[in-house]
């Protein structure tokens, strides 16, 4: 893993020293602020709704305002990781340093994951605000954030992979959004197909379903296996893709 | 220090950018890698520095095989790519600290390494500036500092003087010569005089193949006096006299009263041979106006070597 730390630190540095991370975080928080506000008002006006569901459940995974930013912002965080290095040519000095390709890929991915976590951090305030109004189930909050982290990690891993495929950040973000949207839509298949293998498969890979469960505090090991796979496979392919340039 | 054996690199699978190149660079030696643009210099250096994988052949760096121990092997090299890629959003000192850490320089030694590299490459006066704001000359030298920062035994520099002004070129050449005392230095250029000014040895590459290799003095030897240019007052008589001189061959008139003659193979004592020609001409009563040696320029030697491979 030689080279992980310096690559990780430099990547974080360059995400935060350039406007990229700040713009993404601001956009995200503005959207989530409205999202949260809307939900709270909705539940306040319809008190009878909150018998078996509260704003926490609704916030994590019941509205498109949760998924849309993820689908668009995650690729925004990862698009520059490799594409920019290739465009500048700095990939040449990076890969001729005594580091392993896996360390470079993981360092960059970890930096984007930390940025992603920083982006979500202020939303904890919403929970704190809700606490003033009523009871909070911290178990549910914990599993919800676990879901946020897992789903995000998968999207960021896909974005990292797409960034290794091209020299253009634009191509990288478009490819990532397409792939992530494709996966997201697979989940909708659950409501389209008749009960059977296809239906079950779509239900299994459904992000919507997964977040719905986690937001109720249900942790399903099968879903976790899927999530870890969705992180590991793109990163593994990314390592191979970077190594493949050497032989191009 | 650097051993390259039978190195070939193909980008397309059919045609080779570099083919069957073998050479060695020893410690304490500066070797110039010389060739016209597009000859395969950068490709070779990129393979040797470990950026590109060879299609065939082996590279050994300071005792480590690049294929079986890539990280070890790469840690012995300071490489400066041709385009000198740098991160524009970083400051010079930040960048060099990052590179030092990346190259495994221990935390306690990092500042000393960075300071020394900045001083040697003469970028200490811009240490706190953003790389994106630097001039081409400074960027080039930041790249050089980067190559030096981990104090590697091997330096590979791809056209280190490209884009510099004459003063900076002189400085960089002096630095390369100085570094050559403790390191094994391999640097590429398409400028012949640069090789003459800095290197102990030169490798000449053309169309992906090594066409000549030799010490600089040997290369100079090839451009030693090859003959004489003789100007006289009376053409026909002089031609007669010159034809009788044994050390000369191929006496050709190139203008009225002006001849070019080539030394006969094996005529080693050229100083005296020139005197002999002068004495013979004067004794014969020919009015001698000019006698000058004919030398091939290094450029000609270079052209002969690279054209010969076509």
Image (cartoon, coloured by chain):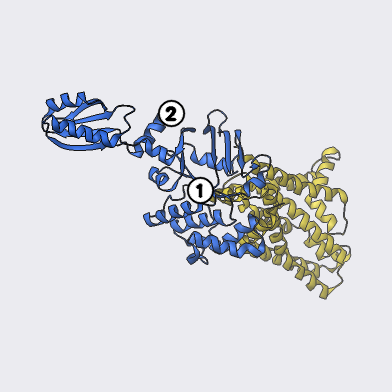
Disc 2 sits on a residue from what chain? B
Residue B126 in the figure: left or right of residue A170:
left
N-terminal label among 1 and 2: 1
Q: Position of residue B115 (x, y in %)?
A: 55, 64
Q: Secondary structure at mark 2?
A: loop
Q: Is residue B49 visible?
A: yes
Chain letter for the yellow part:
A
> Pointer 2: residues within 10 angstroms few (<14), some, or many (20+)?
few
Front position in the image: B17 or A225: B17
Numbered badge on residue B157:
1
Q: Is residue B91 visible?
A: no
Q: Position of residue A172 (x, y in %)?
A: 61, 48
Front position in the image: A105 or B247: B247
Give the residue displayed 71% in from the left and 64% down from the top.
A118
Tag 2 residue = B309
> Pointer 1: residues within 10 angstroms few (<14), some, or many (20+)?
many
| Residue at the bottom extreme, as displayed | A132
Q: Quadrant of residue A200?
A: top right
Q: Position of residue B119 (x, y in %)?
A: 51, 63
The quarter of the image holding the C terminus of chain B is: top left
Numbered badge on residue B13:
none
Give the residue displayed 62% in from the left and 60% down from the top.
A15
Residue A92 in the figure: left or right of residue A68:
left
Front position in the image: B15 or B263: B263
Instruction: Tell if the residue under mark 1 belongs to the same chain as the one under mark 2.
Output: yes
Give the residue displayed 59% in from the left and 47% down from the top.
A171
The residues bearing labels 1 and 2 have C-alpha atoms spaced at a distance of 25 Å
Q: Secondary structure at mark 1?
A: strand
Question: What hue does chain B carry in this figure?
Answer: blue
- Depicted B277 relative to depicted B87: above or below: above
- Depicted B4 relative to depicted A42: above or below: above
Q: Quadrant of residue B5?
A: top right
């Amino acid at each position: 893993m030689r080279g992980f730390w310096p690559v990780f630190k430099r990547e974080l540095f360059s995400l935060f020293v350039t406007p990229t991370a700040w713009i993404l975080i601001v956009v995200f928080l503005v959207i989530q602020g409205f999202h949260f506000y809307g939900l709270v008002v909705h539940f306040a006006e319809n008190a009878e709704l909150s018998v078996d569901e509260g704003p926490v459940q609704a916030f994590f995974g019941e509205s498109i305002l949760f998924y849309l930013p993820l689908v668009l912002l995650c690729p925004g965080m990862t698009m520059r990781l490799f594409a920019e290095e290739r465009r500048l040519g700095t990939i040449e000095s990076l890969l001729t340093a005594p580091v392993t390709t896996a360390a470079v890929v993981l360092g960059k991915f970890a930096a984007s994951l930390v940025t992603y976590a920083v982006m979500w951090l202020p939303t904890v305030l919403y929970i704190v605000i809700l606490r003033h109004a009523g009871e909070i189930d911290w178990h549910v909050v914990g599993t919800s954030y676990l879901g946020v982290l897992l789903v995000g990690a998968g999207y960021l891993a896909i974005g990292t992979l797409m960034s290794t495929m091209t020299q253009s950040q634009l191509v990288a973000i478009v490819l990532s959004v397409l792939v992530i949207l494709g996966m997201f839509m697979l989940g909708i298949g659950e409501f389209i197909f008749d009960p059977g293998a296809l239906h079950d498969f779509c239900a299994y890979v459904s992000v919507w379903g997964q977040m719905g469960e986690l937001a109720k505090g249900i942790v399903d090991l099968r879903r976790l296996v899927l999530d870890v796979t969705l992180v590991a496979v793109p990163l593994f392919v990314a390592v191979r893709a970077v190594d493949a340039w050497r032989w191009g | 220090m650097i051993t390259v054996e039978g190195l070939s690199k193909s980008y397309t699978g059919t045609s080779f950018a570099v083919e069957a190149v073998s050479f060695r660079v020893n410690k304490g030696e500066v070797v110039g890698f010389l060739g016209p643009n597009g000859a395969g210099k950068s490709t070779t250096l990129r393979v040797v520095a470990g950026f590109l994988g060879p299609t065939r052949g082996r590279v050994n760096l300071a005792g480590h095989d690049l294929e079986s121990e890539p990280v070890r092997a790469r840690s012995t090299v300071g490489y400066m790519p041709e385009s000198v890629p740098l991160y524009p959003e970083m400051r010079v000192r930040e960048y060099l600290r990052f590179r030092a850490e990346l190259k495994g320089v221990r935390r306690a030694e990092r500042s000393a390494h960075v300071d020394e590299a900045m001083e040697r490459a003469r970028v200490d006066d811009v240490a706190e500036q953003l790389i994106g704001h630097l001039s081409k000359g400074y960027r080039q030298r930041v790249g050089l500092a980067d190559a030096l920062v981990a104090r590697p035994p091997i330096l590979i520099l791809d056209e280190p003087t490209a884009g510099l002004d004459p003063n900076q070129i002189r400085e960089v050449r002096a630095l390369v010569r100085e570094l050559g005392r403790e390191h094994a230095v391999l640097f590429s250029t398409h400028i012949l005089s640069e090789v003459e000014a800095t290197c102990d040895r030169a490798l000449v590459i053309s169309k992906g193949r090594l066409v000549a290799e030799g010490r600089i003095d040997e290369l100079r030897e090839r451009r030693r006096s090859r003959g004489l240019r003789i100007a006289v007052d009376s053409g026909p008589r002089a031609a007669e006299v010159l034809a009788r001189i044994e050390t000369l061959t191929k006496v050709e008139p190139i203008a009225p009263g002006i001849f070019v003659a080539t030394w006969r193979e094996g005529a080693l004592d050229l100083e005296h041979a020139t005197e002999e020609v002068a004495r013979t001409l004067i004794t014969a009563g020919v009015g001698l106006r000019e006698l000058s040696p004919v030398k091939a320029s290094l450029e000609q030697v270079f052209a002969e070597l690279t054209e010969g491979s076509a």
